[in-house]
Image: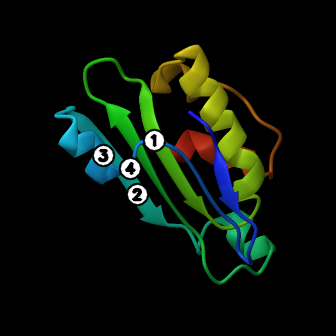
Amino acid sequence: MVPTTVFAHPPLAAVGLTEAEATAQGLKFKVKHEVTTEWFTARRLREPVSAYKVLIDETTDLVLGAHLLGPHAEEVINLFAVAMHTRLPARELQKLLFAYPTSTSDIVYML
């Protein structure tokens, strides 16, 4: 559960398992992913490349992995790492309120 970041433009960040790793471990999980260039966060910052992929365990509802590309990914990934470390279920993470409009406020739509 160590978050990593590629400090490029746009930043790329990840924490936890990849889809291939989760599959290899035989985990049952759902994958949420989307290109987010039309989300307000990307549009207001004029970011032409933005996307995410989040893996959620179907049994426990825990985040298994998060992969972010776009505005402030290097910061947002830390919240996914905290959720994973504390074993906060995705449904509970989705209930949290974040300042809007921030990149962090987009987490609720990624779950």
Q: Secondary structure at mark 2?
A: strand
Mark 3 in CB contact with mark 1 (< 8 angstroms): yes
Identify the residue under disc 2. Answer: 33
Q: Is residue 108 visible?
A: yes
**Amino acid type, mark 1:** Gly
Q: Nearer the viewer, mark 4 or mark 2?
A: 4
**Amino acid type, mark 3:** Glu
Mark 1 in CB contact with mark 4 (< 8 angstroms): yes
Q: Secondary structure at mark 4?
A: loop
Q: CA distance from mark 4 to mark 2?
A: 13 Å
Identify the residue under disc 4. Answer: 18
Residue at 47% from the left image edge and 19% from the top image edge: 89
Q: In the displayed structure, does residue 17 sit left or right of residue 38?
A: left
Identify the residue under disc 3. Answer: 21
Q: Position of residue 15 (x, y in %)?
A: 55, 43
**In which quadrant is the N terminus drawn?**
top right
